Image: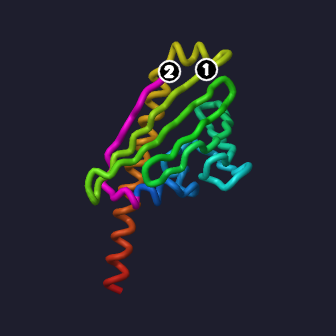
Amino acid sequence: MKYSCEVEIDLSIDRVIELFDNPENLRQWQPALLSFEPLSGKPGYPGAKSRLKFKIGNNDIEMIETVTVRNLPHEYSGTYDAKGVFNIVKNTFTPLSPSRTRFVSDQEFRFSGFMKAVGLMMPDMFRKTSFQYLENFKAFAERSSIESDRIKRQDLHS
């Protein structure tokens, strides 16, 4: 199963990448994430592996992320391997103006075992989750920018 989803973010590409490239921010836009644990390599760089644990409904899901491409600010790609699901993700970032960025996530899922049936019966669940994560990132990024601007204004008036 392959699909793409995208959002336009009212921030510069530099600010979008600054927020996207910080693993401390993952929980801000992936609310089901319980933990992010680097396993090998330099986190965020090609070849690096990390363990991600999620709580989705009553299920604990563990996956291994392997970074395949780091060409920031343009592309960040990787694979995500979980029981019965192998996900290839290509994230691209395009400046639309000095203060607006397009974030596109191309997804490819390969299923095995029981997850083949889940993938066939509920493909929209995967699309909705991917799109929701992009929407969550957009909201987090734009909110963090507003909060940062507010703090700067307060500092100027202090």
Horizontal and vertical percent position of residue 117: 59, 13
Mark 2: secondary structure: loop
Q: Which residues are magenta?
A: 1-15
Residue 28 to residue 110: above or below: below
**66 vs 113, nearest the viewer:** 66
Q: Residue 18 at x, y = what percent?
A: 46, 60
| Label number found at residue 78 | none
Q: Which three-letter amino acid code belongs to the residue tagged 1? A: Phe
Please state the horizontal and vertical placement of residue 125, each as a whole percent of the image: 48, 25
Look at the image and name its color scheme.
rainbow
Mark 1 Cα-neighbour bin, 10 Å: few <14, some 14–19, many ≥20: some
User: Residue at left 35%, top 48%?
Assistant: 94
Q: The disc labelled 2 sits on which kind of residue?
A: Met
Q: CA distance from mark 2 to mark 1?
A: 9 Å
Q: Position of residue 39 (x, y in %)?
A: 73, 49
* Residue sitting farthest toward the right: 39
Label 2 Cα neighbours within 10 Å, binned few <14 / some 14-19 / many ≥20: few
| Residue 75 vertical position relative to residue 144 in the rendered view, above or below | above
Q: Is residue 129 magenta?
A: no
Question: The C terminus appears in which quarter of the rendering?
Answer: bottom left
